[in-house]
Amino acid sequence: MAIWRSFLTIWIVYNNFALPVIVPSGPTDSKCAETLKKINPTPLRPQGSPVQESYFKVIDAVAAQLKGKKTFISPKVWREKTAKSGLPGLDLPLDVGGKNLPPSEMVKIFEYAGRYSLNLRDVVGAAHARPLLKSKEPEHRQIIEKVARGEGYLAIAITEPEIGSDVSAMTSVSTKVPGGYLLNGEKLYNARFETATDLLIFTQAPGSTEKDPKLNVFVLPKNHPGLTYKKLKAHGLYGNSFGGVSFKDVFVPEKSRLGEDGEGRKVFYEHFAYWRLMQTAAAIGTARGALEQTAERMRSREAFGKKIGAFTHLQQELANLTIRLEMASAYVEKAAKLMDEGNYAEASRMAAGAKAEGIDVAEKAADFAMKTFAAEGYSKNVDLGERVNDLKGLRIADGTQSVLQSDFLKKTYGQDFWDMAFGSDH
Ligand SMILES: Cc1cc2nc3c(=O)[nH]c(=O)nc-3n(C[C@H](O)[C@H](O)[C@H](O)COP(=O)(O)OP(=O)(O)OC[C@H]3O[C@@H](n4cnc5c(N)ncnc54)[C@H](O)[C@@H]3O)c2cc1C
C-alpha cells in the first residue's frame, strides 16, 4: 500500500469555475497523481512577460469578484474596478496617467481578457479615447485622463442607417459657422452610447466631394445639447448598448474638432489599424477559451460506450482550429511588433488580414465548441452560445470580414484590385 508523504493541489478551471483537487505527490505518488499532472486544463492560455502576467492576475481577480453577476460582462464596471491597477490606461502615455505599453505587449492582455468574454474587448486600454492623443486641446487631455482613471468611456459614431462600410459616403455633415460648426445627420448601429461619457462623431467636412471626400471628427460629451439617442436590441455583446444618435443643427465649438478640418479619414484609418488588431486578439482569446472547454468535454463525455474524444473527426477539427488560432495569434503579434517599430503601413495591411481571418477562425472555433457540447452547448449551462453570438457581432463591427479582405488585397496586390471591384478609392 502506498504511503502518501505530501500532497499537491491541482486547480481544475472549467467555464469560469475553479475546483481544487488534492492529490498525493512525492516519490510514492499513485498513478492518479501522474495522470492529473499530464493534463493541463489551460493549454491555450497566453504565457506573458512579468508585466503581462501581473495584468492577467488583475483580470483573474476581477473576474472572480464579478462571477455570476450581470456586471461580469460590463466594460464600464470592469474599467472602474481595474482603474487602480492601470488597466484602462495601459496603452496611454505616462503623462496622462497611463502605463505606455506598446502594441506588442497589449495584444496578449487583450487575448487574456477575451478568454473570459468577448465583452472584455472594451476593458483593456483606452479604446476609442486613443484618437484624442493627437489633440493639443486641454479639454481632450482631461477626457483622456478621465479614461485612464476608469471614469471615462468613449463611444464612436460612424455608421448610419444607409451607410456603413463606405465611410467616405456618409451623409452626416458639418457646416462651418462663426466659432464652430453645425452638425446634421443620423448615426445607427453604434455601440456604447448608454455607458459612454463622451463620443466621437464623424461627419462630412465642408468642401468634401465625391471625388475628394473629407471627413471631420468631433469629440462631444454624451449629454451635449441637441443629441437624441435611440435604442436597439442586439443578438450579443450585451455588455454594451446598441443604438443610434441623431442631431439637427447642433452647434459644436471649433475646439471640439479632432485634428485639422478635413482630417477625419486619417484619424479613422490610424485608429482602426490598432483597434482591429486588439479586437482580433480578444476574439482569439474568446475562441481559445471555448476550445479548452471542448477538450475537457471530449475527455469526460461518453457516447456509444466511448469518450467522445475517441471520435477522430472531433480530434481533427479540434487540431485544425487550434492550429489556425495559433497562426492567427502569431500573425497578430507580428503586426503589433511592426506597429511598435513604427511601420504603420505594413502593420495596417496585416491588421486588415488579421481581423478578416482571425475573427473567422474564432467564430468557427466557438461554433465547433457549441456543436461538440451538443444540447448542453445550446443551453445557458455553458457560455458557448454567448461566445458564438458575440463573435458574430465582431465579425461585422470595426469592419466586416469581406471589406477587410478587399482592403487587404488592395494593400497587398495593388490599388487596381480595389478599383476593379468598387471604382476609385479616393
Ligand atoms: C456589434 C456591433 C457593434 C458596432 N459598433 C459600432 C460603433 O460603435 N460605431 C459605429 O459607427 N458602427 C458600429 N457598428 C457598425 C459596423 O461598423 C458596420 O455594421 C460595418 O462597418 C458594416 O456596415 P453595414 O452594416 O452598413 O454593412 P454594408 O456596408 O451595407 O455592407 C453590406 C454587405 O456588403 C459587404 N461589403 C460592403 N462593401 C464591401 C467591399 N468594399 N468589399 C467587400 N464586401 C463589401 C459587407 O461585408 C456586408 O456583408 C457595429 C456593428 C456591430 C454588429
Image (tube, helix red, strand yellow):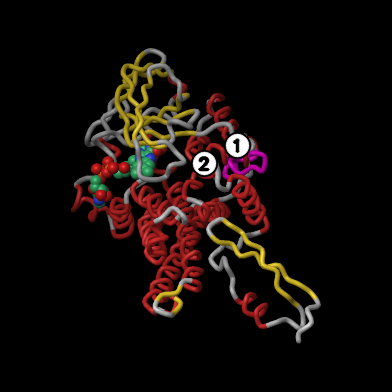
Q: Is residue 22 above or below residue 227?
A: below
Numbered mark located on residue 70 in the image = 2
Contact between marks 1 and 2 (CB within 8 A): the answer is no
Which residue is the site of mark 1? 80
Q: Does 334 sit left or right of 385 as displayed?
A: right
Seen at 30% across and 22% down, the residue is 184
Magenta range:
83-94
Q: Is residue 86 magenta?
A: yes
Residue most toward the right?
Answer: 5
Residue most toward the bottom?
Answer: 1
Seen at 40% across and 37% down, the residue is 191
Q: Residues within 10 Å of mark 2 (few under 14, many from 20)?
A: few
- SS at circle 2: helix
Query: Which of the two discs, 1 and 2, labels the residue nearer the N terminus?
Result: 2
- The residue type indicated by label 2 comes to Lys
Image quadrant where residue 227 sits: top left
Residue 340 seen anywhere in this rendered image of the structure: no
Seen at 39% across and 30% down, the residue is 201
Q: Residues within 10 Å of mark 1 (few under 14, many from 20)?
A: some
Disc 2 beta carbon < 8 A from ligand 1?
no
